[in-house]
Image: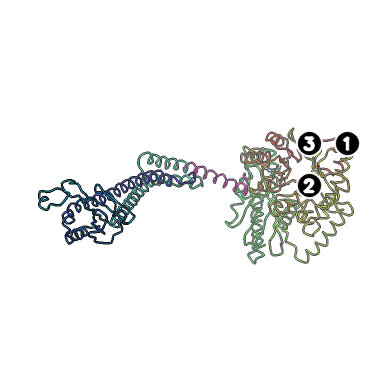
Amino acid sequence: MNNLTLRQRLLILTLLPSALITTLLVLYFSMTGINAIEDQLRGKGLATVRYLAPVSEYGIIAGQMDGIYGLVQAAMQEPGVKAAIIVNPKGRTLAVSGRVSLPAEIIRQHLDKPALVAETETWIAFGAPVIRTQSDSDPLFDIAGLDENPQETIGHVFIELDKLDLIERQRDLILQGLIAVLTGLGLMGALAIAMADQLAKPLQRLTAAVRQMSAGHFGTRIPASSSGELRILEDGFNDMASHIEGAHQSMQSRIEEATAQLVFQARHDALTGLVNRREFELRLDKALANVHAGGDEFSVLFIDLDRFKAVNDACGHLAGDELLRQIALLLQGRLREEDTLARLGGDEFGIMLANCGLIKARQVAQDICALSAEYRFVWQDRIFAIGASIGLTPVSRDVREIQEIFALSDAACLRAKELGRNQVCEMAPATQTERRRDRGNWAGRLANALSEGRLMIEAIPLRALQPGVPGGPMAELSARLNEPGQAPVALSALIDAAERYDMSSSFDQHFLDTAIRALARANKQHMPMTCMVPLSRASISTPETGDYIAARLAEHAIQGEGLCLMFSEDVSTHQTSQLIEFSRRMRELGCQIVLTEFGGAISSFTQLRTVAPSHVRLSQSLTRDIGDGMTSTALLRAILEITGEQQIFPIAEAVDDTPLLEHLHRLGIAYARGKAVAPREPFDAWFEGVVMRGSRG
Ligand SMILES: Nc1nc2c(ncn2[C@@H]2O[C@H](COP(=O)(O)OP(=O)(O)OP(=O)(O)O)[C@@H](O)[C@H]2O)c(=O)[nH]1
């Protein structure tokens, strides 16, 4: 019963009792009808013999066989009579008509009065005595003995009635009963269905509408077509649905607004509203792919403002921010719609000049130089002159990946600074021949640096800002290539070169060896220590990296505890499955994973679940504007909440001044690194001084 719908239940409840009552009533009336027909037949039989007996008297007494025969013939004319017999007192037949079924012993029996004498399924027989009655004429006939016995039985009459007619009528009666039952049931069924529909249909509509609503179709409404309480329910549902839909729509639009804002923030710089470095990289990537596909070549400008720090130092960061905003407008004014202007960080801007060769790009860069030189920044009663050092790179098919554009433009910009600022320097991508030569050069330089120990490993110390986070000496490993007579080469350029010339694994192994050796020594002395080792993209893809780490840990008989392997968020986005597998293996060894550049994009949050890092190093774009940037603070708070729930420690980088450090501490950031924490130093010096002797930090 529980599985039945409301309509079915209503139908059962109304139909079942009425069907029962109708059937009983019809049965009762049919049975009464059948009995009446039987009584009628009996009455008719008795009446016939009652009539036949006296009229036969004279014929029997007078022995007029013709008369008696005439009587039985006449009886046969009655409808339903199948046989008629007149017998003498001894049962001998005097006259008979029809097909007699009565047995002889019944015919021979003596009857006192008219009675039913026999009955089968197909016929019924009645008999009556023929009694001699005294009449006025009797003495004339002088029949002997009449006086003495006036009630003498002088014979019997019998008639047999056919019951077929009776059966037929009974059958008709039952059939009529059945028809009555079925008609009644049909009518009641139709009535019950109409009633059930009237009640159940609106309720079914309501149920379906509630289901639709709970499935998220908030526009669902039902026709308010019922009356009474059902109408109140329908109207109430529609009102409720309207309210829910309204609330949902306003919530949805707020979510969409917030999402759009987040997406915008993830792609734009909060201070200037320009696209940020990440978005700039994406657009460069797209444009480069287009060049490789035969599309237009383009040019890239890297701009580093000159003497910007002086504004900050003299008038504070608010003034510096205002200057950055004004410069953004100044630059934008010189560009076309199809060009992209981005703030890459600090006082650095990037420009992608669409469909623009070297000559045209040179002109734009010169114009920007001139504009920047002419520009004056006025803050309160002070006026500042700044300038722009610009690195220009024309991008052709010779460029293989955007890292090359960054390296070339960076180097060109640096050169412009070195040559006296406010000027344009160009760096064209290497041709195939130059590349081969360069490869030889770099490969040799890196190989020599590794074998001759000229690759200086440095420690960038970290400080725990919160009381509850794991403490102890902690440092991120970095490297610098020191070659005689050459400017030192920074880590990013080294990693770039190592990746480009397939030397990543030797490079990474050098880092790993340094860290694992130090961890083993610290372990022996029971000194706590954490080393964060940056690994290249290539290391993720090869299982050999995991094997190498496992082998080195085993060789020094230590667990991976204290060894944190660092990957940029970019690696985790593009090589997610490899990173998941790698981090699983590392966790088995007791090592931890650090994701860097975290929070620059929404995709970062997905990595938290898949990669399950122990630490995240926050994107500089999040902490740079923290002093006055409400958005960054809000974003940081959101990140802290999410990472806090998952026991992931956030690290802030480039923390160069004490106010920022204090601000981060107040916000709840777990660790910080930068000039305000401790300067970078050779790893060995840090290890001996901070870890082994505990003299600093
Ligand atoms: N006001 C403000 N200052 C910033 C922001 N981001 C970075 N800075 C500061 O900008 C300065 C950039 O340093 P530099 O490029 O060495 O300064 P500079 O005076 O332009 O030096 P040159 O490029 O050698 O001429 C640093 O002092 C940063 O602290 C920011 O968003 N707002």
Give residue 449's position: percent from left, percent from top.
86, 54
For residue 255: magenta? yes
Residue appearing at x 54%, y 46% in the figure:
256
Label 1 vs label 2, nearer the camera: 2
Residue type at mark 2 is: Glu
Query: Real-space Cα distance between discs 2 and 3?
Result: 23 Å
Residue holding disc 2? 588
Q: Secondary structure at mark 3?
A: loop
Q: Quadrant of ligand 1?
A: top right
* Neighbours of disc 2 within 10 Å: few (<14), some (14-19), many (20+): few
Q: Which residues are magenta?
A: 246-271
Residue type at mark 3 is: Gly
Write down the quadrant of residue 530 in the picture. Answer: top right
Marks 1 and 3 close (CB-CB < 8 Å): no
Residue type at mark 1 is: Arg
Q: Say left or right for 61 vs 484.
A: left
Residue holding disc 3? 471
